[in-house]
Amino acid sequence: MDLFIRHTELCFAIAAFFLAFAGISLLYKRIRSLPMLVPGFFWLAYGAWEYSLKGSGANIRVDLLLIYPLLLLAMVVGAGMTMFFTMKKPSGLMNEEAKEAEEDAVSDEKDVSPAE
């Protein structure tokens, strides 16, 4: 993690990745990845924070005990919500309209008597 402290531009690159992923999903509307905005903004804020502290000579960084878990949580939640929103429903589960249409089709078949 010392890498992000020495090279703050990597934080901005990671933020750009998450924000671009969310932006592309807005254009195509096939992938619902707006939750990816959350880690993007977290990484952007962290990069700005590290850039402001660069050269301050702080040896002991207690703030990182809070920041790194928040970054990890934001990435896990953003990726998890994106996967949840993009998963297809199993074919066994039907909405109410599909159930009604199937029941109507079955009742129509019962109403029609075979010609003798």
Image (cartoon, rainbow, N blue to C red):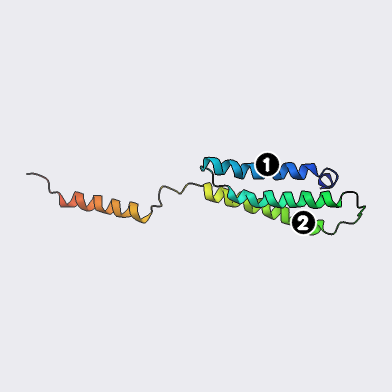
Q: Nearest to the eye among marks 1 and 2: give it.
A: 1
Residue indicated by mark 1: 17
Q: Position of residue 67 (x, y in %)?
A: 77, 56
Q: Earlier in the sequence, mark 1 or mark 2?
A: 1
Q: Residue at x 69, y 42 (%)?
A: 16
Q: Is residue 113 left or right of residue 60?
A: left
Which quadrant would the C terminus be assigned to in this image? top left
Q: Residue at x 46, y 49 (%)?
A: 89
Q: What residue type is labelled 1?
A: Phe
Q: Residue at x 76, y 51 (%)?
A: 46
Q: Which amino acid does label 2 sit on?
A: Ile
Q: Residue 67 carries which label?
A: 2
Distance between the alpha carbons at the discs numbered 1 and 2 = 19 Å
Contact between marks 1 and 2 (CB within 8 A): the answer is: no
Write down the quadrant of residue 70 in the picture.
bottom right
Q: Residue 32 carries which label?
A: none
